[in-house]
Each structure stands twice: as C-alpha cells, then as structure tokens.
Amino acid sequence: MRICLVSETFRPQEEGGAEISSFHAARNLTVRGHEVTVMALGRPGDRKAPPGRQNTAEAFALWRVPYHNLYLPGPKPPSVSRLQKWRWHGRNALGAVDRRVVEEGLREGAFDVVYAQNCSRMLPALYQEAGRAGVPVCQHLRDYALLCPRASMYRAGGNCSAQCHSCRLLSWRARRASAMVTSVIAVSDFLRKRVQAQGLFRDKQVHVLHNTNMARADLDTKLLAARPEPCDPFTFGYLGALAPAKGIKVLLDAFAQLPANLSVRLLIAGRGEAGYVERLKARYAALSPDRLVWLGHVPAAKVYAQSEAIVVPSLWHEPLSRVPIEAASYGLPVIVAATGGLPEIVASRQIGWMYPATDVSVLNAYLREAARAGSAAWRAGLAKRFAGLSGFDGTAEATGYYDRVEAILRATIEEGRR
C-alpha cells in the first residue's frame, strides 16, 4: 500500500504520546513493506520543522505542509498571551493550511489511503482535499481534538459532559468535513463511545485498538538489567505533562501525606507551563529534595529503570495513556486513576491498582501499602498482587496490532473504490 500517514507534529519536534504512536506506526508499516509518506506541519524559519520534503534516517518519507499560523502545535505549552492563543485557535478553525498544497501533494503521491493520526490543525483541508483527490481516509482517534481545541474536553477543573459553545464553534468546519472519513479507529472503547455520543462518526464502524503499537524491537532490552537491586528508598515514578488535568497535584498531595519516617521517594518526569510548575514546586518545597525529585523532561526509560511502581493520576478522561502498557512491558505495576480508557487495560489485564481520581486518601493508602512492603518484598510479591504482570506482553507482535491496522486500511481502500 502507498500510505500517507498524517501527524501534524513529528520528529525531530518534541513528542507527546500521540506523536510517539505516529512514529511507531510509520516505522512499522514501512518495515512491513508499505510505502509510507508522513505528512506533518512545517513553518518557515522553524529549525526543526521547515516546510517541504525532509531527509530522515528512516525508510519512510517526511513531507511538511506550510502552516499559516502564529506557532506550530505541539505537546509543550507555548509562552504566549491569552489573546494570541485565541487568535491561534481562530485561525485553525478557519483553516491554517493551504488546500491546494494538500491536494497537489496527495495527487502527486498517488496514495492508496490517508491514515490520519493527530491531524485536527490540518482540518478541514485534509478531509476535503483527500475527497477531491479520491483518496479514502482512515482516522485514528487518540484524543478529543475533533471536538475540543485543547483535545482534552477538560475545563475549569472538571470533565466536560458535552461540547461547550466555543468548542462547537471552533470545531464546526472540521466536524462537517468529517463526513468524508471512510473508516475510524479509536484507542479505547471509552473514546469511541464518547466521540459518538457527541455526534461524530455515528454512521461508521469504529474499530478499537489499544496503544500496543510498539514493536518488540523498540523495547529497551537493557532497561530491566539497568534497574538497581531492591533497596531503600522505595521509589514511585510519574511521567507525563505537568498540568492540572493530569492530576499531578492529587499525586503530590497523597505523597506529601506519607509518614515522614517512611523511606520513600517520588520521581517527577515531565514539563508544563512554567508558572504552574513553579507554583507546584513552591507548594511542596517542604519535602526533601531526596524525597521529591523533579527530573524535568527525560527519557521514559530513566524513570522506569529507577521505579518500583508508576503512578498515572489523570483527572481528565484520558482515552488511553501509553504509560501503563509500557510500564507493564518492563515488569512494573501501575497505580492509576479510574478515568477514561485506563480501566480497559489496567483492570482487564490485572497489571495495577485503580482508585477514584480525586480521592487523595485512597491513593495515599496505596502508596503507603507499597512503600511499607519495601522494595525487595514488593518485587517478590508482584505476581501475587498483580496476576497479569507476569509475562505481560504489550508489544505489537503479541497483540497482532499491525495485522489489524493493515486489515482496516485495506478495507478502507476497498470501501473507497465503491
């Protein structure tokens, strides 16, 4: 198949979970013999993401479409004023990519299918011009970006039950163009139900594929060998954005309430809006720097290698974080908030504990139970506590992930020919 894989943000730009998943998809579909071109956004003058065709060390091609807006999208929050953010969202709503460039590229590539990942800032042009070029679209949903400019449907400390007026206005053109999509994949059944409840893709069969798209070859085989022998302090790890919706404050509150004589530490890996991060650090400044360690943005392996358990405290209805699957693949249990699609992998596979997302006391009790066990006893008792952790294999090979993707893409092509 000749595949145009769309990911508005792509390496060497900074990555979040959706961008990492898009990279794995491009690499693994190429390895399986398909001709893949990644379509991403570029901006004149940007060192990492200039417009045009780009050279990569990978076997797939990379083509960046000019993005006519104040700044490129990405996982790192920009340091701009509220007015500039509104201008940016408004420009996206009107269309920030040149439709003619998109259409010419799609026709020139003679693609069999457009495999759209995170692409909301390319809409409605991508859907419309794929339709004009006669290329069917498979949309892989990883968040709520087609419904909410923030992609989270989380606002003012709570999850939105439906689209607010401003989100409906800003997404109106993209929603209308979504009728041109041929097939849909969602990373969780929770996401499928929530998107369809808001009126999107109700007439489509939405396939559910959990985020098990990392090939076995992409696992860090040295990681477990690099983990130290069980010792004090007992170490918890957090990795992800430092943002209110991620529940980082709930985790820190629960951790701060652990007894002072308990040998324990928490590694915080991630980045966020500078002012918010500084407020967090000031709020928990009383905790010893040996007890609460701010790592900043580091490779995930650094956290996995040093931790006994990983905490995923998301307050927003996270469709399905990659973290529980990655952690379990390295033999680490997770303690997660029971939100969004997380129970679909954690509860069903028995790889961790779950707690009500806003309940600091329950999370504190889990942290206390784990830490009091001590690292050696904790590791020795993992199989008893978490039955699914022993032999857990969340790789693409074990789950047949790319077999299913290929089947869906081929069916999309056949449907497009009718």
Image (tube, rainbow, N blue to C red):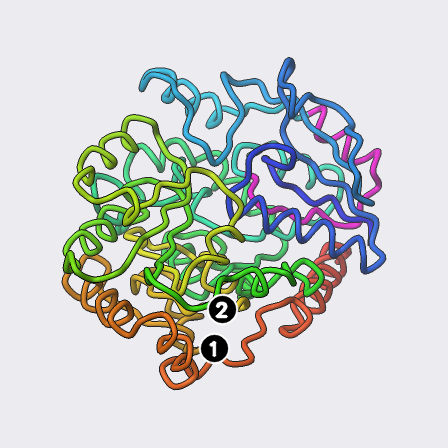
Residue 147 located within the stretch drawn in magenta = no
Helix, strand or loop under label 1: loop
Q: Along the line of sight, which residue is nearer the eye, 259 or 398?
A: 259
Residue 289 image position (x, y, % from top left): 28, 42
Local crowd at mark 1 within 10 Å, few (<14), some, or many (≥20)?
many
Q: Which residue is mark 2?
A: 328
Q: How many marks?
A: 2
Q: Is residue 323 left or right of residue 398?
A: left
Helix, strand or loop under label 2: helix
Residue 329 image position (x, y, % from top left): 54, 68
Q: Is residue 99 left or right of residue 2?
A: left
Local crowd at mark 2 within 10 Å, few (<14), some, or many (≥20)?
many
When asked about the image quadrant of residue 65, the answer is top right
In which quadrant is the N terminus drawn?
bottom right
* Three-letter code for the amino acid on which mark 1 is drawn: Leu
Q: Residue at x 46, y 53 (%)?
A: 303
- Above or below residue 251? Residue 344 is below
Q: Along the line of sight, which residue is nearer the eye, 375 or 100?
A: 375
Over which residues does the magenta segment extend?
100-119
Residue 389 numbered mark, or none: 1
When asked about the image quadrant of residue 261, the answer is bottom left
Q: Residue at x 34, y 44 (%)?
A: 293
Residue 192 image position (x, y, % from top left): 45, 61
Q: Residue at x 63, y 54 (%)?
A: 182
Q: Along the line of sight, which residue is nearer the eye, 81 or 415?
A: 81
